[in-house]
Amino acid sequence: MIKDQALGLTISIGSVAGIAAYFYLVFLSPWTLLIIQISAFAAVATILAIAAWIGYTLYTSSQAPIDDTENTEKEPKISDS
């Protein structure tokens, strides 16, 4: 458990440091326009890469039909006797 807590603390500190660095780069540095352009490109490229991966997966998957009759449960017949 101590290892997990140490990892969690490290991730938290790294995230806060990343937020502070990004804030500095976007609002206080002379490279503001470049940082915003890189950030926007990375965001759009990530979304399009995920869409391309989904499309590739759909394109290359096998097209075996699914038979629903095997998965349905038959209701037991109740006799009126």
Image (spheres, grey):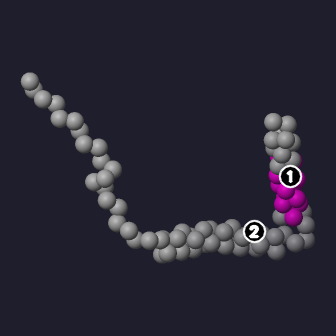
Quarter occupied by the C terminus: top left
The number of discs equals 2
The picture quadrant where one finds residue 46 is: bottom right
For marks 1 and 2, give the CA distance: 18 Å
Residue closest to the eye, 6 or 71: 71
Q: Earlier in the sequence, mark 1 or mark 2?
A: 1
Q: The residue tagged with tag 2: helix, strand or loop? A: helix
Q: Amino acid at mark 1?
A: Gly
Which residue is pictured at 77% across the width and 73% down the height?
Answer: 38
Q: Which residue is mark 2?
A: 39
Q: Position of residue 18 (x, y in %)?
A: 85, 56
Chief SS of the magenta region:
helix
Q: Amino acid at mark 2?
A: Ser
Q: Is residue 18 magenta?
A: yes
Residue closest to the eye, 7 or 61: 61
Q: Residue furthest left?
A: 81
**Magenta region:** 12-25
